[in-house]
Amino acid sequence: MLRLLVKKYLTETLPLLIACGCVLLMFPWVRIWTVSQFELSGFAPLIEQFKAFEKFSPVPLAQFLTYEGIIGLTFAEPIVLLCVLTYCIARGTDVVSGELGRGTMEMLLAQPLHRWKLMAVHACVSISGLVILCTALWVGLHAGIQTNSTLVKKSQASLTLPGFNWSMPNPLTASEEVVTPLSTLVDSQLYVPSTLNIFALGFFVFGLSVMMSSWDQYRWRTIGVVIGVYVAQVLLFILAKSTPQTRFLMPFSFLSAYQPDWMVQAIGQEEMPMFAIFRFNDNPKNWIAGIELGPMAYTSILLSLGALALAVGFFIFSRRDLPAPT
């Protein structure tokens, strides 16, 4: 019976998984190819014009003048988030309210099958699909970095006067642009923590969808509730970053734990360990008593919230009375 259940969920998952996976595989390569057509230092005057909006960014805007920073923005692209969230919401809301809406839940539970096993098989298949999507995203980033080159401005040669400890640009030579492989400028391993972070975000949204589905009867209403919760969290996150007076709202938005851009900056520029949970820092602006959260701390928060939501969903579904099919 479990084998048939796995086959059923795989059949339902595969079309959406293939569609989202192809987008997540190809989009990073196309985006990196587009980025590689520009010499980023020329955008410095433009970045200066947006200094007022720096408070909405998890990293200094100067980070976007580096290739590792601009590639890291892939994780904030709407099309990437749309693919991951669409998959997670679609699969999470289908487990209970989707089966009830189609009238197939009674047939499933008429078999010698515990309710928790039904949800566990569904969760395993759906989470495996999420792993595939996030792997496709990282593979697309890796392929884009390995196969593209960009123009890098080479500085002028310097003149050094013998006996003097100073140098000056040689006026007889001009700076030139040299074609440089992106793989020599950016290490794709830098984006592993960010990939884990987007997986954790998807896992939480999936857990939230399962929890909402576990008590509802209509899938359309479950989807509406989950999307409403997500939009409310986005608005709360924006409000929390807008002014110092509303900063206290930051812990109440789960999006404050989605920090892929900051992870790229912290690992690449600040040399924070890739899988650090926290580190001690003398900067008084840091968290509590000089403790600064690391990349894995934010990912662990989302994974823990997702696991809690799944557990609540399992509990509700195991105890609720199922309505008669309409």
Image (cartoon, helix red, strand yellow):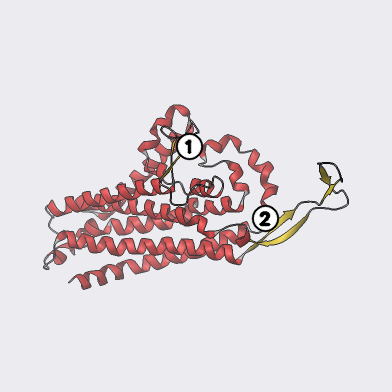
| Location of residue 165 by image quarter | top right
Does residue 317 appear in this view? Answer: yes
Residue 112, position as x, y percentages in the image: 11, 68
* Quadrant in which the N terminus is drawn: bottom left
Q: Answer yes or no: do the residues labelled 1 and 2 have beta carbons within 8 Å?
A: no
Q: Which residue is mark 2?
A: 38
Q: Is residue 279 left or right of residue 31?
A: left
Question: Most extreme residue toward the right, as rendered?
Answer: 172
Q: Secondary structure at mark 1?
A: loop
Does residue 103 appear in this view? Answer: no
Mark sitting on residue 281:
1
Image point (59%, 57%), residue name? 186
Question: Most extreme residue toward the front, as rendered?
Answer: 163
* Total marks placed: 2
| Location of residue 219 by image quarter | bottom left
- 269 vs 93: above or below: above
Q: CA distance from mark 1 to mark 2?
A: 36 Å
Mark sitting on residue 74:
none
What amino acid type is highlighted by mark number 1?
A: Asn
Residue 174, position as x, y percentages in the image: 83, 53
Image point (35%, 37%), residue name? 252
- The foreground one among 96 and 284 is 284
Image point (63%, 60%), residue name? 184
